[in-house]
Image: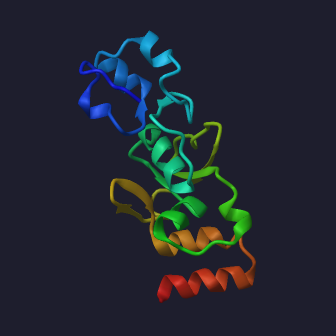
Amino acid sequence: MHVDATFPMALRGRPFRVREALRRGVSAGRLRSRAFLRPFHGIRAWAEPQTHDERARAVQPRLRPDQAFSHTTAAVILGFPLPRRLERDHRVHVTTIGTDQALRVRGTIGHRARRGRLQVVHSGTAALTHPADTFVALATLLSRDELIVVGDALIG
């Protein structure tokens, strides 16, 4: 996609929030144009996210400081092996830590956890649940054998 010189450098080549673009002087009309993809409500992207990791990066501008990727999304970012049925599910899992409302955006699954119950770590610029907390969250989604495979990957 051709980007003219007036488009803010800070927004080039990455998904961004509409609110941020407006604050940086991009017109609402330009943001409504077909030049941008809309992977999530309030988000514009330069390219369609293809992988689970790319979908997580696309929703990331919407996350608040009290939110982190969790469950299968954290597992993918951490490189845990998941069964195909979960790899095909492209919904992004986000856990809100504290009493605020869980994320409610089409294409995501919001969870809530009490403050102090989860640790958050950072992988690059992404906040995600600690590998041990991710493993515990996966216990609700995986069979025992699948969980053993993930556990082996976690400690190996």
Where 1 sits versus 108, above or below? above
Where 60 sits versus 1, above or below? below
The colour scheme used to paint the residues is: rainbow
- Report whether 136 appears left or right of 10: right
Report the quarter where the N terminus lies: top left
User: Looking at the image, which residue sits at the far front?
Assistant: 2
**Can residue 96 be seen here?**
no
Q: Give the image quarter of residue 8.
A: top left
**Can residue 134 be seen here?**
yes
Residue 6 point in image, percent of width and height: 25, 18
Where 23 sits versus 10, above or below? above
Instruction: Pick the residue in front: 91 or 64.
Output: 91
Instruction: Pick the residue in front: 140 or 108.
Output: 108
Instruction: Pick the residue in front: 65 or 42.
Output: 42
Name the residue located 56 percent from the left edge and 55 percent from the top edge.
52
Name the residue located 42 percent from the left edge and 39 percent from the top edge.
61
Name the residue located 69 percent from the left edge and 58 percent from the top edge.
88
Instruction: Pick the residue in front: 122 or 35.
Output: 35
Name the residue located 45 percent from the left edge and 10 percent from the top edge.
29
Residue 44 point in image, percent of width and height: 47, 30
Q: Total of numbered circles in the picture?
A: 0
Residue 94 point in image, percent of width and height: 55, 51
Residue 130 point in image, percent of width and height: 45, 69
